[in-house]
Image (cartoon, grey):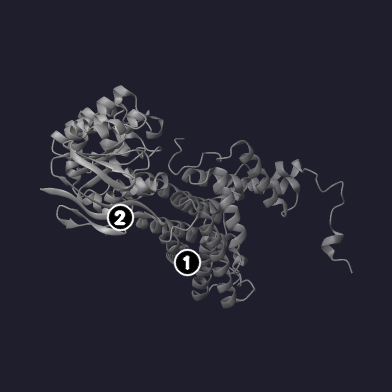
Amino acid sequence: MTLLELDDVSVYYGRIQAIHNMSFTVEEGEIVSLIGANGAGKTTTMKTISGLLNPTTGTIKFMGEDITKMKAHIRVVQGISQAPEGRGIFPAMTVLENLDMGTFGRKDRSGVGEDLERVFDLFPRLKERVKQYGGTMSGGEQQMLAIGRALMSRPKLLLLDEPSMGLAPQFIRQIFKIITEINSQGTTVLLVEQNANQALARAHRGFVLETGEITHSGTGKELLANPAIKEAYLGVG
Amino acid sequence: MIPTILMAAPVANDWITLDFVSLGQNFWSATFDGLTFGSIYALVALGYTLVYGVLNLINFAHSEVFIMGCYAVFFTLSFLGFGPSAPNLGIGQIVVNLLLALLAAIVASALTAFLLERLAYKPLRKRNAPRLVFLITAIGASFTIQYLIFLWRGPVPEQALTMFQTKPIFEVFGTIIYSDQILIVTAAVIMMVVTERFISKSRTGRGIRAVAQDPDTATLMGVNKEKIIITTFVIGGILAGAAALFYVMKIPSGVVYNGGFILGIKAFAAAVLGGIGNVRGALLGGLLLGLIGNYGQILLGNSQWTDVVAFLVLVLVLLFRPEGILGTSLGRSKA
């Protein structure tokens, strides 16, 4: 089943066009990676899907329903949850309060405890630090918190915007391992990354984004093997 | 002919005399009165601080949200037949009258705050206006409301209405505490504690804190930012309405079209002193400003100095703690 479908989507910042006629789908159960350099339009794409930005043309469908004009805070309730670029941790809230914010739009309070246990299983470090303030945590811990918080809304589609940004290599491997685990538990993941190597190795399918346009698409393995991509994104000549 | 005020003006060598004897003699009465006024500042300061928290906007028109509450108190009491001298009423009747006036003030102030946000600020947000445009709009809205009241009521202050004869209740450190002081401080503290609890514990309060800390991420959590913003304005209005009742109780002759200006500036200063955006800071700042103003007035022997001293202290505090005493972020204080 197609979970998310972008059809001919264009996004502008004032007069500057950031996304050009983008079309792609995310199928239920997949990990899809969108890779690209700085300024390629990765974050813009994410914000458009989560509703923080509105496309000028094109439609976005989620589970077959047109959500192009749906407000961002309602999309969360519908099942789209995002760990934003820069993590977006509330600095003056504790770890537990941050996780609790992830349940803000939920109607079923009864399932919250269960999901909290699941997040603590995935990220035991968060359980140790429930009372610590978000602003005082390291980058890696904040990334765990951002992903854990996004899971607290029990999403059908998890959007991850550069989860590896600013992290030490051992943290990056750990984060990607956990993303695979989240996916195997049944959550569909759409990921944007500059770290193409890890992002494509973990993905079922991938897209390459250059100045607001999709230039390559294929399975993760195909893209990893593509010489042009190797040269541009994987640092291999 | 020389105006009497100039003839009475002190000569150069005694106008900076610090009258510590008077301060010592009147210390406790100055303290209790300072706390009373400080509570009123604090209630109004909360409105500045909450709106600043969620919008990063200094809502200069909040002083008019307050004065609308004062007018509501005035009209309600006039309607109930109050005049310049205190009516001889039983305690039950006084309480009923005060509650009616409080209700009217809260409705008037909250409605003003609601309309202000809907008519002045929301259209700007839709257009992604720069911050300076919001600030100029706030000042413009303040003047607009003032002159609308001016057109309606003219330049002369409304007749003073006395709500009740203040009674001495008990004595502390040889100073008599009056019923209005107890009423104002108690009611204000209860309202501030309820507000603080609401912001830190309720679902809406969590939404307010989330929007204050990171509006985009708050939206991604399912928080309806627009609803949070309008709620914040209404809460500020409710508190300003309560402050209006207490203010008219203390200064019955102050209801005039621009009567909110000075109090608004002081409440804003109180919010900055405590740390703007910080709920407990507004409380602390309000009480401190009330105390400092009253001590300064006695120390310098002239009520004209009240505001000067208060602002001098504000500037000194900000020199050493630019973020105010408790820091700026909404809910960030851990003290």
Q: Mark 2 points at which residue?
A: A10
Q: Could you tell me which secondary element the residue under label 2 belongs to?
A: strand
Where does the image place residue A182, in percent across and percent down from the top left?
Answer: 18, 34
Q: Residue at x 40, y 37 (%)?
A: A91
- Which chain letter goes with mark 1? B
Q: Is residue B216 above or below residue A123?
A: below
Residue type at the position of mark 2: Ser
Residue type at the position of mark 1: Ala
- Seen from the viewer's position, the closer of residues B234 and B93 is B234
- Seen from the viewer's position, the closer of residues A159 and B70 is A159
Q: Residue at x 26, y 35 (%)?
A: A148
Q: Is residue A17 above or below residue A218?
A: below
- Seen from the viewer's position, the closer of residues A224 and B73 is A224
In-image side of A117 versus B18 (left or right) = left
- Seen from the viewer's position, the closer of residues A125 and A27 is A27
Number of residue marks: 2
Q: Which residue is drawn at 27% across and 43% down?
A: A82
Where does the image place residue A144, in percent across and percent down from the top left?
Answer: 29, 32
- Residue B303 position by quadrant: bottom right
Where does the image place residue A208, in percent across and percent down from the top left?
Answer: 26, 40
Screen quadrant of the N terminus of chain B:
bottom right
In-image side of A14 versus B18 (left or right) = left
Q: Mark 1 points at which residue?
A: B101
